[in-house]
Image: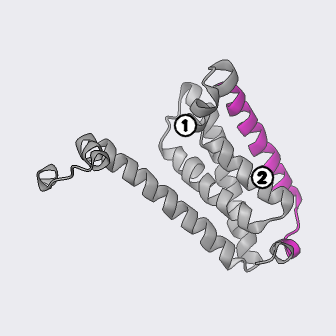
Amino acid sequence: MHAESACACFRRDRTGWVLVALNLLMAANSTLYFTGMLGAGVDGWLAMNSCAPSIFVFCLGYLLRQRPLMAVGAGLMFRYGTLGLTTFGWDGMNLIPQAGHILMTLAVIYFVVRMVRLRGWGEIVTALLTVVVMLYTWWQSTWFGRRPEVWKALMDGRLRPELFR
């Protein structure tokens, strides 16, 4: 798809601008918290705050009117934002990221509704594939996390059947 045709039918609207602004504020807040207040560094920020980069991808797509880029961002925001609603608790300091997860979920819903109205099926498929890849990597990490001896054997080139019994 050409860049011109990807944005030809996409018009930014008030709802989109509000969602982009609120999500960017939450991303900036969490970025400052992890890198500034906690001093976690960029690697710590990326490891603990996957939401902010996801928001940046979505918002960049919105600002550039690039539906495929928005689709990737929407898929990532579903993985980290919408599913984050079930991962984090609902008390104390967790209320702040949960507010961000709600905003991310609203942006995902906005994206899906807009793409359905514009018949952007390719973008919806792109978002779904992004979600599938992200969930697979989460599952794989969890699987190996429960089986560190298999991970070590795999990395050492020493897999054997006994590890799976």
Q: Identify the magenta region.
A: 7-33
Q: Tell me which amino acid carries mark 2.
A: Cys
Q: Overall secondary structure of the magenta stretch? A: helix
Choose top left, top right, bottom left or bottom right for residue 4: bottom right
Residue carrying label 1: 47
Choose top left, top right, bottom left or bottom right for residue 7: bottom right
Locate the N terminus by quadrant: bottom right
The secondary element bearing badge 2 is classed as: helix
Residue 135: give x, y in percent of width and height: 46, 57
Residue 52: give x, y in percent of width and height: 67, 42
Q: Residue at x 28, y 45 (%)?
A: 156
Choose top left, top right, bottom left or bottom right for residue 48: top right
* Number of marks: 2
User: Crowding near pointer 2: few (<14 within 10 Å), some, many (20+)?
Assistant: many
Q: Is residue 117 above or below residue 79?
A: below
Q: Is residue 92 visible from the viewing direction of this image?
A: yes
Residue nearest the viewer, comparing 141 with 86? 141
Q: Tell me which amino acid carries mark 1.
A: Ala
Q: Is residue 27 magenta?
A: yes
Residue carrying label 2: 59
Residue 157: give x, y in percent of width and height: 26, 50
